[in-house]
Amino acid sequence: MKKIIAILLCLTCIVSLVACNSGTANSSSTAAPAPTATPEPTTEPTPAPTEAPTPTAEPTAEPTQEPTPEPASEGGKTLVVYYSASGNTGRVAQAIANTTGGDTFELIPVTPYTDEDLDWTADGSRVNQEHDDESLRDIALESTTVDNWAEYDTVYVGYPIWWGIAAWPVNSFIKSNDFTGKTVIPFCTSSSSGLGESGQLLADMAGTGDWQEGQRFQSSVSDEDVAAWVSSLG
C-alpha cells in the first residue's frame, strides 16, 4: 500500500513539473509589449500675430530752408552790335555771339540801302553822294535803343569799311548811347582795306567807354577764325 501511494506521489510530481515547463515556454513565446511613446506636451505654441507690427515712426526731418538768392548784379553780359550792308559783317557778328554767348543787335536804316545805292563805282550812287557830302551821313535807324543796356559790360561794334572808315549808319548808334563802364571792341569786314582809324574815330565820337584796338576780317573769313580771335582776347 505504501508503495502505491509513493508511486502516485511521484506521478503527481512529474505531472506538475511538465505543466510548469509548458507554462514557462508559453510565457516566453508571448511578444514583448511595444514601449510606450513619450507623451507630447499638451501646451500649444503661441501663434504668431496675424498683423504685421506697426513700424517705429522715423523722426520727421526738419525742412531745409533754401537760402534766399541775392539779386543779380548788373553787368557781365556781352552784346554784338552791327551794321551789315551785304551780309558779311552780320555773319561775323553771329560767329562772335555764338562764341561769347552774347546777344546781337542789328542796326537797320529806316531807308535801306539797295544794291544800286551801295555801288561805289557808279557816279551819283547813294554811298558816293554821302561820301562826298558829309551832311548826308546822318542815317536814321529803326532803333538805337538796346533793351537792358546797363546789363552789358562788353560791346562789340561791327561794320563794313567805307573809304577807310566805319560805314556811317553806325554813327547814329554810337552818338545815341552812353558807353561808360563798358569795354568796346570794334571789328570790321573788308575785301582789301584795313581797320585803319575807324575804331579810334568811333571812340572819339562816343566820348565814353574803354575802346580796344579791334580787328579787321576778310569778307570770306571762317567762323573758326573768328572764334579763335575772340578766344585770344581773353
Image: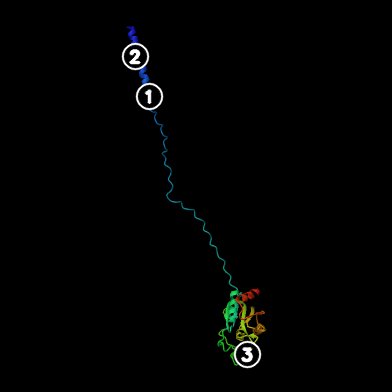
Q: CA distance from mark 2 to mark 1?
A: 23 Å
Q: Given the current orientation, which residue lies at the most extreme top position? A: 1
The amino acid pointed to by label 2 is Thr
Q: Secondary structure at mark 2?
A: helix
Residue 27's mark? Answer: 1
Mark 1 or mark 3: whose residue is earlier in sequence: 1
Disc 3 element: helix
Q: Which mark is residue 12?
A: 2
Q: Residue at x 36, y 15 (%)?
A: 14
Which amino acid type is shown beneath numbered disc 1? Answer: Ser
Say which label, 3 or 2, has the lower sequence index. 2
- Evaluate if marks 3 and 2 touch, with contact meaning CB atoms under 8 Å apart: no
Colour pattern: rainbow
Marker disc for residue 131:
3
The first of marks 2 and 1 along the sequence is: 2
Can you see residue 149?
Answer: no
